[in-house]
Amino acid sequence: AKEAAALVSTLPDLAQLRRDLAARELVSKALGKVCEVSASAAESRDGRPFAFLAGIVKGMCRRGFALAVVLAARDLHRASRGGAGAYALRAAWDGAMARIRDHYALEHLIHAAIALEAPEAADLASVLFQGGLRSSADVRTALLDRVLVKRTLPRRAVRAAFNLLGRGEGEATVEEAAYRAAQSWSREESPALLTLGHQASLGCAIIEGLARTTRERLESEHPTVPLLLAGVSARLSSANPSVRTHGMAIASALSSVLDPAKPIDFGRPGPELVGALLGDLARATCAKDEDEDEGEREGQEGGELGCYAGAGAAAASGSHLRDIGAAVCYGTPRDSADCEVASISGTSSAESDSDDESLESLEPYDLSDGDEEEVSRLPATLGGLVKALRRPQDHEVFERVLRHCEGLISRADAGLGAHVTDLARALLYADAPEEFMRGGGGGGEDGG
């Protein structure tokens, strides 16, 4: 079943045009067949149909067709509402989710589902992931540790994720999600290393979690409050007014949970502070979504697959719509062409001072081909290298950064200790482009 699924998942790559539509049709047919036999397979404990579907879903998601997978599931969900087909769809999908261990594929699948702009999006997300969130640690990890924490999500997607988590049976998943977001947001280096949009996305997740919990649950489940206090303190001392506003917004939301009768007073109403944070998020995600929608419309019929609609377009100005450095998130399906080399060389105002001053004198590592323009686009410090690895690129840029990594580390003995943890984490979770994962990188120019 796994071998057959692997072969089927490669078929869209052979299509000359409309590869997304080809992927969607293949997934739709496979899902329909598995739904037909899901009841008998579950009764006889035959896992082959579910393994087959899991292999197709994983393969498609790793090849950049996560949205096509979600749309295929949506089509079947629409056709089977209120009947035995709805039960069969949930059973088939739960069986497949229990067999997918690939966090990369799950991340892209979950992101495509919660970012889908459709009337039945919330109900569809429940069908696709509610069973997996209860039974699979891999699904929970992909949602909490990758999608919510490492991606810049529009407010709509954050709410969709928390609506899904809030339906968990007997699990404090909302509090856990707020805690995971607080862990990343409260790090001392976060205001310098993360884009303003990413910080706003984490802040939105924290505010959403605080709005759905109580003081007793917040203080008993996880040490979220001390983390948030540390993050607020770090941001209030920032020179960036937007970063300070984010700190005040989180402090205001936290105080309304801890002591609603005595909310903290910053001279500005709490809703106004939260609105400023959400405005930064809208500007970042609107710019990213506009670029994605433009790419989806090229060669797609009727814009059916362009479902990553921008949130809060009215809040975004023209200059922000072109600021790719601030808009880019941690790995979006099929967005490597949008970022290109600009995602390495460009920095936002929130990260301009993030490099270690002790490493400013380091010269860029000389590549073997001696291309001066290529060298100038590569990071010259370990802090810059960490940022480059955390951004998505095309496979050629990704390969050059990895080749550059070894030489830069070997020349930075004095400053390695201060960056070793962040560098190891960036290398471990580097979001390699699809072409690189399929073997397009790693061989250099001579293919060796």
Image (cartoon, rainbow, N blue to C red):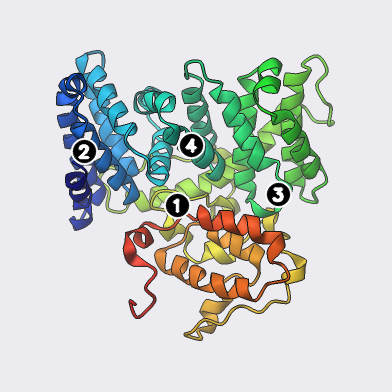
Question: Which amino acid type is marked by label 4?
Answer: Thr
Disc nearer the start of the sequence (3/2): 2
Disc nearer the start of the sequence (4/3): 4
Give percent across and percent down for residue 444. Answer: 39, 76
C-alpha separation, residue under disc 4 versus residue under disc 2: 23 Å
Q: Depth check: 301 or 266 in front?
A: 266
Mark nearer the viewer, 3 or 1: 3
Give percent across and percent down for residue 94. Answer: 31, 27
List the residue tagged with mark 4. 141
Number of other residues with Cα within 10 Å of mark 2, as a class: few under 14, some 14 to 19, many 20 or more: many
Question: Which amino acid type is marked by label 2?
Answer: Phe
**Secondary-structure class at tag 1:** helix
List the residue tagged with mark 2. 52
Q: From the viewer's perspective, is residue 422 above or below residue 207?
A: below
List the residue tagged with mark 3. 191
Measuring 66% from the left and 36% from the top, which residue is drawn there? Answer: 182
